[in-house]
Image: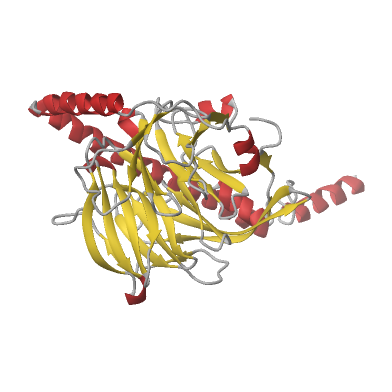
Amino acid sequence: MSIGMKIDYRATDRVRAMISSLGRTEDVRFSPSNRRLAIAAFNKSRIAILDVEVGKAGGSPELSLTGGFEISSPALSFPHGVDFLDDETIAVASRDGGVAIFKLPVAHADDCELAPIQHLVPGSGSIVHTPGSVSVLHGEGGLCELLICNNYADNVSRHTVDRNAGCSIVKSDTLIRKWLYLPDGVCASRDGRWIAVSNHNTHGVLLYERSASLNEDSSPVGVLRGVCFPHGMRFSADGRHLFLADAGAPFVHVYACDGQGWHGTRLPAASIRIMDEQVFRRGRNNLQEGGPKGIDLDKSMTVLATTCEFQSLQFLDAAAVLAATSSGSPVMEVEYELGALQVDVEARERGRDAPEARAAERRIRELELLAAHHERRAEKFKAKAARQKAKVARAKAKAGFVIGGEPRRITAPLSWLFYAFKRQN
């Protein structure tokens, strides 16, 4: 990483301990007021909520994490995506548990279990299936839209939410489907004009112009290339840059447009290495892992936050990242990329015609969820063993077996008698 990009944040010991215990993380998101930060802890099936202060001193960004807590819920099952409807309301997309909306405590210091105020449950008749990412688009009159990546259903669904009516779901439909192949992230520009979807299995990002005519048969107007396995994404405040986390490489890629829009095919205007080789290799369980997962920009465009399993939380100077970015890269016609996407779809359809191929695909997806389940159980057993070990140590200390690492109390009278007898002889 370039010198001067990383921000060393201040935090209490409790907050640092919380961050280091998160395990595998997926998404990260600043709240609308810039005062909170949410992180999805996948294997723990929890969401960490941190209190944040972002500022500048002498022109350099400063950041403090002043508190935080974790929320749990029966509705959280491998949470993968998170976004704020407002500072006290979040939507969480869980791979194995649907999409849940929670009302957060206004001020809280302890971990808590919450029941969702709304829950989009997968199943018969539901268009939500293995959701992995969620993005909130704010509208007028208390209405907002949830854009949800349904990973293994290969689509993005749209759900209109009425915040003035207990976040009730007003309408749901499938918004984007064409050429999607395991969509792993979705985000919208701040002005709501552009929607980006990271297409994991075709190694690119598809861009759509948000309009009344956008539907599941619409083709993307832009494609971003030069990424291994695209994951989390965020547009800059002015919509002229897009920051992309590459789960398959130790980089954040930055793409640029000239203000005329995101039409055409682009390569990164900059690729910023955000972790050293040792950290990257620790998470390199397969070709799709090791790099950053979640990414977000604070509302003032001061800091860029990233997260992954072995680098739970990192902050970069957003201005320094942009300064290392060129004004843009050559824009190519998008037709070639759309043709390549169509060829890929036709090849997959031919493969799916074979019953054994369909069975293998289902089995792979089942094994992925099972592996995540066992990983979460292992983390629970480790935590339980650590608690039991600490309990035994406390019991020994209380009984007097060990104080300061040496035998005491119970053995002390015996030692006194031994030395008294020895002096007499």
Q: Residue at x 81, y 48 (%)?
A: 418
Q: Position of residue 301 (x, y in %)?
A: 59, 50
Q: Quadrant of residue 182?
A: top left
Apparent side of residue 271 relative to residue 346 in the rendered image (left or right): right
**Nearest to the observer: residue 77 or residue 409:** 77
Q: Residue at x 53, y 37 (%)?
A: 310
Q: Quadrant of residue 318?
A: top right
Apparent side of residue 281 relative to residue 176 in the rendered image (left or right): right
Q: Position of residue 248 (x, y in %)?
A: 44, 29
Task: Please say whether residue 317 is visible from this viewpoint.
Answer: no
Quadrant occupied by the C terminus: top right
Q: Position of residue 282 (x, y in %)?
A: 52, 29
**Nearest to the observer: residue 175 or residue 98:** 175
**Nearest to the observer: residue 43 or residue 345:** 345
Q: Position of residue 281 (x, y in %)?
A: 52, 26
Give the vertical position of 240 relative to 119 (above or below): above
Q: Residue furthest front?
A: 260
